[in-house]
Image: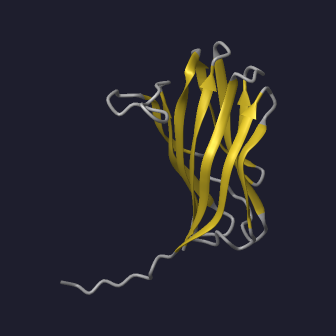
Amino acid sequence: MPNITAAPVTHKILSKQRNLLVENTTTETDLWTYTVPANTLGTLNALHVRIIGSILNSAGTVSFILKWYYGATVLFNDSYASLTTNAARRPLDFDVVLAGNNATNAQVFGGNMMLSIPIAATIGTGDLATDEQQGLSPINGVDSAEDSTASKVFKLTVTPSTASVNAEILISQSYTELIQ
């Protein structure tokens, strides 16, 4: 068998955020944000972001436009369209990666974004007995050409279609991890 060696991979938690609520607005609002220090991505490093939260819509038919940005580049833009009214929360889970693409001015972005149907568990949100995914969407954003030798903001924004305290998106927990 050939002797294969590889450089060790390290993981470092860079940030944790909790309990951010966006409601009663139709303005694009930062839902999650992290300022990437200069030279962090380099040519091959990656940022892994995990976001856990929920969406509530008891205000009528509502959609939520979600956008991911790195610097001035919109990496991904789409909508959870026409969520029907329900008093139960919809669990959401976003798991994405932004990585250097062999140059300091080239990045790739992708991951998964999941939203459940509105079902209450015995305790918590969700139901293991029901196939409850409203959408599990593998996403692949556009490639960006941002200069990662300068600090850049990496963020997720939301724009609700209806301003109501009954149309909200809540981030319960998130973390940002550097993979080298």
Residue 77, compared with residue 174, is above or below; it is above
Which colouring convention does the figure follow? secondary structure
Determine the residue located farthest toward the bottom in the rendered image.
Answer: 3
What residue is shown at x 63% (from left), y 21% (from top)? 57
What residue is shown at x 61% (from left), y 45% (from top)? 172
Quarter in which the C terminus is drawn: bottom right
Determine the residue located farthest toward the front in the rendered image.
Answer: 123
**x then y, percent, for residue 55:** 60, 31
Determine the residue located farthest toward the top in the rendered image.
Answer: 60
What residue is shown at x 78% (from left), y 38% (from top)? 29
What residue is shown at x 44% (from left), y 82% (from top)? 7
Residue 160, compared with residue 173, is above or below; it is above
- Quick check: can you spot residue 142? no
- Quick check: can you spot residue 161? yes
User: Which picture quadrant has residue 121?
Assistant: top left
Front residue of 44 and 179:
179
**x then y, percent, for residue 51:** 58, 48
Quarter in which the N terminus is drawn: bottom left
Q: Report whether 10 appears left or right of 36.
A: left
**x then y, percent, for residue 114:** 49, 37
- Marker count (numbered): 0
